[in-house]
Image (cartoon, grey):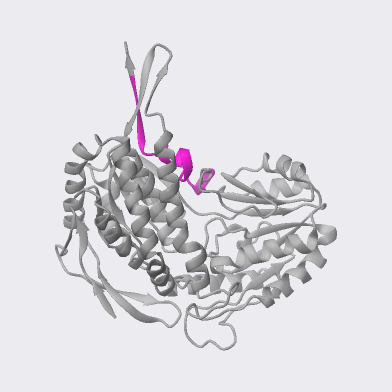
Amino acid sequence: MTDHLQFYIDGAWVNPAELRPHAVINPANEEPIARIALGGKADVDRAVAAARRAFASFSQTSREERMSLLDRIIAGYSARMGEVAVAISQEMGAPMWLANGAQAPSALGHFMEARRLLEGYEFERSIGKSRLLREPIGVCAFITPWNWPANQIACKIAPALAAGCTMVLKPSELAPLDALILAQVLHDAGVPAGVFNLVNGDGPGVGAALSAHPDVDMVSFTGSTRAGILVAKSAADSVKRVAQELGGKSPNILLADADLPKAMQISVLGMMSNSGQSCNAPSRLFVPAALHDQAAEMAGAIANSVKVMDPASAERGAIGPLSNANQFQKVQALIQKGIDEGAKLMAGGIGRPEGFNRGYFVRPTVFAGATNDMTIAREEIFGPVLTMIPYADEEEAIAMANDTVYGLSAYVQSGSEEHAFAVAKRLRAGNVHLNGAGMDTAAPFGGYKQSGNGREWGLLGLEEYLEAKAVMGK
């Protein structure tokens, strides 16, 4: 077990104001792998002050200076990406094939996209009889989750640096190790002192202090809707900008003209990826009633073919454990709730998979014959659990898909792209994936309703970190 008991503040690794060690647990074996320190208000004050001082100069750097800085970060991160993948796998349980193939590289993609946007972005342009200036918003607080840790950190840091902002990061205390590597990458790349700061801690100790801090101009939060509400309330007194990417209960509409075997492979494996721990996971599968029983049998067989393995040695396509004990207990309780409420269990169920007597491993689970008012169709489970719901016609499918407090993502599968697109335009979600299409770092990511109120990634993600100033008479 290693100790990482310092924070990165004002260009140096420093001791916390008060040492409060916290164990980082490997979810595959429930053993501690490292210790970090949990910060508090004094540490936040120190980090915010450093970011405030640095903003005066960093906000005035040229486009070319920031492009060069991003180039150095990209090179440094690329050199250590394998190390980041190992950290992610150990701290939150992602299988190494996924950590190497998606978790760690996703962060690199955001730095590359920010660099590309920065090169051509118009920070000044004429509008009417005036001049419109886009200027960095100021000091940003970033509060990030454990499920895609490097991805969610980079999609905030990269555009903020491109915009000329300074920042304080609080990564998840459950998965902080990749963030510590990234902090060193930024230091080695020559990020000026105070521009980037990192304070480890929990929500009450550091997250609340950051979101309420009067010298923070913006807080960007990714996590549960419950926690996002608390962040917004805490930020309200200082009238700062709040950008949130919150929970989801994403519908996946399988239309009658879809290729059923192909669509079921996409649907089930898409749900099981990352052990179901993605806010945009396609967790509610709507199937034409006439095809439901056939589709349910297919889904059960596909789920039963998904291997659950130790993350360090998992083969491609296998899933690892859930990230932490609380999540494991929550998912177990919701699977039992689905059974109790009468959904038909086609695969999986409660308990660990065969061969595991420790670790937060969950059986890939499929429920069929569910209704849209069941708990498993309403609550975000955040585990490898698919809920299948039959529908009579497309109007009913669309109505049920939109009948949720969430609106992060949606999925449509059809034999016709135009048919799928027509349905997509009627879905109340920030992202809609047609026929298995993946993510796009150039496209905005974010949701409607209680899934959030901001956009990350791409051009709109960059503009989240820019203020608009109108200069009349120029």
Query: Tag count in the figure?
Result: 0
* Horizontal relation, residue 248 to residue 285: left or right: left
Q: Which residues are magenta?
A: 448-470
Using the image, determine if residue 123 lies above or below residue 381.
Answer: above
Residue 295: percent from left, percent from top: 78, 65
Can you say whether 365 is above or below 443 in the image?
Answer: below
Front-lying residue, 169 or 87? 87
Question: Where residue 467 appears, x then y in whole percent?
Answer: 34, 31
Q: Is residue 465 covered in magenta?
A: yes
- Identify which residue is drawn at 25% across, 59% down: 199
Question: Is 3 left, or right, of 261 in this rendering?
Answer: left
Q: Is residue 411 visible?
A: yes
Percent x, y for residue 321? 50, 75
- Which residue extends farthest right? 290
Residue at the spot 44% in from the left edge and 42% down from the top edge: 116
Residue 95 point in image, percent of width and height: 50, 73
Quadrant in which the N terminus is drawn: bottom left
Asked whether 37 falls inside the magenta stretch, the response is: no
Comparing 344 with 243, the one in front is: 243
Residue at 16% in and 42% down:
53
Q: Is residue 366 above or below residue 166?
A: below
Residue nearest the viewer, comparing 9 with 335: 9
Rendered-image quadrant of the C terminus: top left
Is residue 343 visible in this depiction of the protein? no
